Image (cartoon, rainbow, N blue to C red):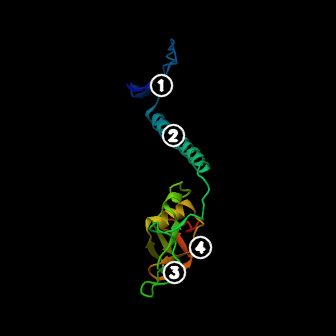
């Protein structure tokens, strides 16, 4: 007999699967235990696993909804460069060798630490050229804290910036910025 503490005992007898429940008092007809054929037992096991997953998903969704409710709204005035230093006037200047800006603005570390409303994703795909670009943690966390913070981003293959609606998070069909 295998025992699920406090609930059920599961065993077998004469080619059948027997479940004992401590709340059931056996009578002369053997009530107090349930007998399954092996096929029934397998199908019950499948159903138990299926419903356990549904129940766990529900709990996770409740917990996630509760977590999101308690995250303070983003304060977009808390802007820093990606290294945490103050925003510079000339950060938008494009480096002619790379096509990238001199620097990029992100939410400041303390603002990002207040909580993410999306997963932190480091790579996105430019649908136009199908190339993947990875970014640093400050940018990735800014997207996670405030998905609408940026309006465009850089493709390292095209070596240019484009509007966000040309990009999806790598491995998904989810638009960057959503
Ligand atoms: Zn591209």
Mark 2 beta carbon near ligand 1 (under 8 Å):
no
Task: Give yes or no for contact between labels 3 and 1 (Cβ–Cβ under 8 Å).
Answer: no
Q: Are marks 3 and 4 in contact (CB under 8 Å)?
A: no
Cβ atoms at labels 3 and 2 below 8 Å apart = no
Q: Residue 71: x percent and y percent?
A: 58, 51
Instruction: Name the spot of residue 141 as percent of width and height, x first.
Output: 49, 62
First in sequence, mark 3 or 2: give its number.
Answer: 2
Disc 1 and disc 2: Cα gap in Å? 16 Å
* Mark sitting on residue 57: none
The answer to whether the residue bearing label 3 lies less than 8 angstroms from the nearest atom of ligand 1 is: no
Q: Quadrant of the N terminus?
A: top left
Q: What crowding class fits label 1: few (fewer than 14 Cα within 10 Å), some (14-19), or many (20 or more)?
A: few
Q: Nearer the viewer, mark 3 or mark 4?
A: 3
Q: Earlier in the sequence, mark 1 or mark 2?
A: 1
Q: Quadrant of the C terminus?
A: bottom right
Q: Which residue is mark 3?
A: 90
Q: Is residue 136 in view from this perspective?
A: yes
* Numbered circle sitting on residue 52: 2
* Callout 4 secondary element: loop
Query: Closer to the observer: label 3 or label 1?
Result: 3
Using the numbered discs, state the Cα–Cα distance from disc 2 to disc 4 in whole angstroms: 41 Å
Name above or below for residue 42 compared with residue 134. Answer: above
Q: Is residue 165 above or below residue 145?
A: below
Q: Residues within 10 Å of mark 3 (few under 14, many from 20)?
A: few
Question: In the image, 75: left or right of 17?
Answer: right
């Amino acid at each position: 007999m295998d025992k699920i503490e406090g609930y059920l005992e599961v065993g077998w007898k004469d080619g059948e699967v027997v479940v004992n429940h401590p709340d059931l008092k056996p009578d002369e007809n053997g009530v107090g235990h349930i007998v399954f054929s092996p096929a029934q037992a397998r199908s019950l096991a499948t159903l138990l696993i299926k419903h356990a997953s549904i129940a766990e998903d529900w709990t996770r969704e409740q917990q996630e909804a509760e977590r999101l409710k308690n995250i303070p709204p983003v304060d977009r005035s808390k802007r820093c460069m990606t290294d945490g230093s103050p925003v510079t006037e000339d950060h938008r200047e494009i480096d002619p060798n790379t096509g990238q800006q001199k620097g990029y603005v992100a939410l400041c570390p303390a603002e990002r630490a207040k909580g993410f409303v999306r997963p932190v994703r480091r790579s996105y795909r430019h649908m136009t050229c199908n190339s993947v670009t990875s970014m640093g943690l400050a940018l990735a966390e800014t997207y996670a804290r405030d998905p609408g913070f940026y309006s465009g981003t850089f493709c390292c293959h095209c070596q240019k910036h484009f509007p966000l609606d040309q990009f999806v998070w790598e491995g998904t069909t989810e638009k960057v910025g959503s």
